[in-house]
Amino acid sequence: MAVFELVMPKMGESIMEATIISWSKQVGDAIDQDETVLEIATDKVDSEVPSPVEGKLVEILFKDGDVVPVGQVVARIETAAAGGGSAPAVAPATPVAVPAAAERGTVAQVAAQTTASPVAAAVLSAPADDRFYSPLVMSIAREEKISQDELNRIPGTGREGRVTKQDILAYVSNRQKGGVSAPPSVHSNGKAPAAAPVAGGFHIPQKTFSFNGEYEILEMDRMRKMIAENMVYSKHVSPHVTSFVEADVTNIVLWREKNKKAFEQKYKQKITFTPIFMEAVAKTLRDFPMVNISVDGDRILVKKDINIGMAAALPSGNLIVPVIKNADRLNLAGLAAVVNDLTDRARANKLKPEEIQDGTYTLSNVGTFGNVMGTPIIPQPQVAVLAVGAIKKKPAVIETPAGDLIGIRHMMFLSHSYDHRVVDGSLGGMFVRKVADYLEAFDPNREV
């Protein structure tokens, strides 16, 4: 007999831990190869962890609700392989993604099919403030505008009182029929409680502030806590510097306006500005490979692949960054197809774990919110991020062989934040200037 060590899988380059939702197997249970052993949750997706081997589960090292670092052994499986002793830890099993909103349709559709149960009809119980909620349950709560206080009072049928998907859907169905009334929002005119430290391994000192007016207390969901931790960590680790350039993108605007119908007819894809910006960034990363890097202690890792992250806002207000792998190998039509697909699935919470990892550089289009510029925060472990602002018509000086003229042009600001440990001002500034040069050199007569 041999013992196989099952470890917490790596769900993304910036994700260093995951929460165990539940164990599908218990000690003594037989396990088939590729059979699910446990369910885990990160700030992005819920996932099932399958066993890469066949055998019997002999030891569980963590319980439900535990937050476990990536690579940590979570269970041991006894196999029929020859040889004694414990097998060394192996590479993490490949998780099977179960996105938060995947294959459940709308909450109303599923709730309509849920038979009313004692849970749904029950009066809200006492608050359970320390109870763990999976990202799936939190997603349904956000869609149905269930407050944290109301969620805390829903009786759960899961292990240790955890609220399951069926519990919350049954509750929603009953609430829509008037069977349960939502508790009032929490208000107070006393002193605010001390802010809790950011979840995870990186903590900052918290101060207590008082406020004498009326206020409402809203609990951060797990995804917001993780975003907060990552942002604070990035600002702590990387000394941020931001360079700005204004680019004349008139040729791009006119070309898109002229060709967007023909482009859609030919490729069955809408053409937005984002794929055009991606194309320019990919070219520039080839020109400046020392921006396509990450830092490992006192070593610089130069990435051979150009994988561009695309910051996308979710309906919840949270942020997710799907990644376009090998963006420099795609033409404009290919970039448009990938951008549209990732954007649509990000908004529907249907991204796979591998689609939000291994980014080497990130583009954020703050112009979609009407912002003219921004100072983006670097997603670790990358060393730079580019924000493109809203395109605005402005009077501008046009240089011609006959002299300078004043004309109306479509102008856009580019904001390039970079890690000053490894990207100096000259490199960071030349990079964003080169992106602008590619955009300004866009051929207005380019074939669709």
Image (spheres, grey):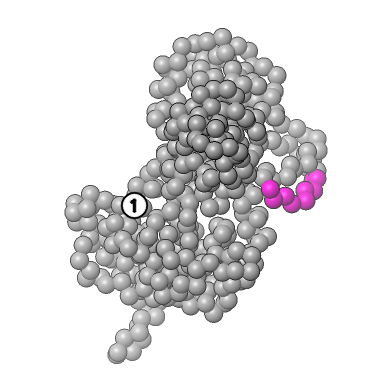
203 in the magenta segment: yes
Residue sitting nearer the eye, 113 or 149: 113
Question: Where is residue 130 shown, x and y percent of the image?
Answer: 70, 29
Which class describes the residues within 10 Å of circle 1: few (<14), some (14-19), or many (20+)? some
* Residue 119 appears in the rendering: yes
| Left or right of residue 351: residue 63 | right
**Picture coordinates of residue 386, whole percent (x, y):** 49, 64
Horizontally, residue 259 falls left or right of residue 322, namely: left
Q: Which residue is mark 1?
A: 338
Q: Quadrant of the C terminus?
A: bottom left
Residue type beneath disc 1: Val
Quadrant in the rendering for residue 382: bottom right
| Residue at the limit of the structure toward the bottom, as seen here | 402
Q: Residue at x 60, y 39 (%)?
A: 86
Q: Which residues are magenta?
A: 201-209
Q: Is residue 98 visible?
A: no
Residue 125, given in percent of the width and then of the height, sits at 67, 17
- Between residues 359 and 236, which one lies in front from this camera angle? 359
The secondary structure that most of the magenta stretch takes on is loop
